[in-house]
Image (cartoon, rainbow, N blue to C red):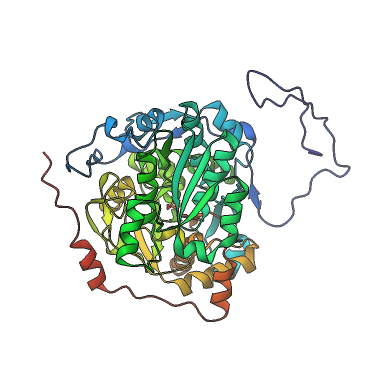
Amino acid sequence: MEGQGEGGTFAGDPRKPVALTFRKRHLPNGFRRLGAVIKKILLNEEDIPERWYNILPDMPAPPAPYLNPQTLLPMGPADLAPIFPQAIIAQEVSAEPWIEIPDEVREIYRIWRPSPVYRADRLEKALDTPAHIYFKYEGVSPAGSHKPNTAVPQAYYNAKEGVKRLTTETGAGQWGSALAFAGALFGLEVTVYMVKVSYDQKPYRRAMMETWGAKVYASPTNLTNAGRGILADDPDSPGSLGIAISEAVEDAATHDDAKYSLGSVVNHVLLHQTVMGLEAKKQMEMAGEYPDVVIACVGGGSNFAGLTYPFIGDRLKGRMPHTRFVAAEPAACPTLTRGVYAYDFGDAVGMGPVVKMFTLGHSFVPDRIHSGGLRYHGDAPSLCALVDHKVVEARAYKQKEVFAEAVNFARCEGFLPAPESAHALRAVAEEAAAAREAGEKRSILFGLSGHGHFDMSAYDAYFAGKLEDIELSQSRIDAAIEELPRVPALS
Ligand SMILES: Cc1ncc(COP(=O)(O)O)c(C=O)c1O
């Protein structure tokens, strides 16, 4: 890059340095800082983290064990073998605080990582706040969100262990796209069960997955027992993430050459996502600030965990005791704010592990909101434990207020947020107002987990006044919670 090069070698693969030399050139008048702030804080490829951060050993209490869905007794690693490769199972139960990122994964991360942190100074002005607002932008990945951060390592470990095909679910299509992309890079076939409501809303997401070579089905399908069962009860079922997970797990468990790949909720996925927070910590250091509050949206929890856990680790170790963490979820699927903290099935028909989490009940089918990626009845067990321990605060928002913030953000900062990510923006606006009222120059960091380029029909509906704010009745939650598995007391 002109004016920046310090003659030297470009060391992509450390074993085979590529002799690319950059000549040092100076701009005639040197650099001139434009504007009052540094707009984007960038890291170099060498700054891609070498290790993922595992929060489990730093948690206030040990994790509740996963239970076998048939026996409701604690599961061992062997119980996970039909659906996950060994390396992933080892990560799922690891008590090591740091886990090395394979070179092959870092090599692919270089396509879009490190992702930028931006200072949202124009949004600060629009919100009339003394707060400094920063955002970590994951829309720069090929699939358009944070999801490839885990899709790539998952595809890598599966390919290394000889797996030929991966099965998965997708809500908004972001996760399915990420796995389709990662599968293409490692020569794996990918089968995606896409929640029907999103399949209908987002034909171009499907085409994107197909471009990377994946096969995509609208879930519930007639291809699995789980799907056939749901369709028998409700032929017009809009589908849900819980149902699509059941289909993908069944497909993997009944085919020897296939394994299942999950886009959120479980420990190894959250672990892989910590590249975001680890980079963001360095970038905030470069900005000379440590966030007073870190905000991200929650579907199953991997986006939130990926950005916040490296900061939460500091707080749990007593280093930054005053930093707050806000999880933003949809009012139509208010898992953390209105769910119960109990053991429940991770999927709709009880094929996958039973985990302790905040849940709306595995039979709960959320209404057809436009944030498909947030329509999940439960959340990551570690995140739920942090909410239970009051380390993380959860807030629920309605669609219209979320889209109002998305539009405001796009008009200030340019980027067009995914509807999921825009939930975080609503919390940012609240925190910005609180800083104004307190007259304090607080520092806010939030995750802009993806772009909304495939969500324009949702923006259209918002502009046409067709978006509905769905009030979820307590009776619907109560009915689903009635169906929680009766777990014997664990000693
Ligand atoms: C753009 C975007 N942000 C956030 C999420 C929620 O992700 P998570 O399940 O990791 O909480 C999704 C889920 O699909 C998404 O597509």
User: Where's residue 90, x and y in %?
Assistant: 36, 29
At 62% from the left and 66% from the top, the residue drawn is 410
**377 or 7, nearer to the observer:** 377
At 42% from the left and 59% from the top, the residue drawn is 374
Badge count: 0
Q: Is residue 51 visible?
A: no
Instruction: Assign the N terminus to one quadrant of the image.
Output: top right
Residue at the farthest top position: 15
Residue at the farthest right position: 28
Which image quadrant for residue 250?
top left
Instruction: Assign the C terminus to one quadrant of the image.
Output: top left
**242 or 371, nearer to the observer:** 242
User: Where's residue 291, x and y in %?
Assistant: 47, 50
Which image quadrant for residue 96?
top left
Above or below 483: residue 153: above
Left or right: 308, with 474 as reference point: right
Q: Is residue 55 visible?
A: yes
User: Where's residue 484, x and y in %?
Assistant: 20, 56
Residue at the farthest bottom position: 465
Left or right: 186, with 480 as reference point: right
At 54% from the left and 57% from the top, the residue drawn is 133
User: Where's residue 259, x and y in %?
Assistant: 41, 37
At 39% from the left and 33% from the top, the residue drawn is 256
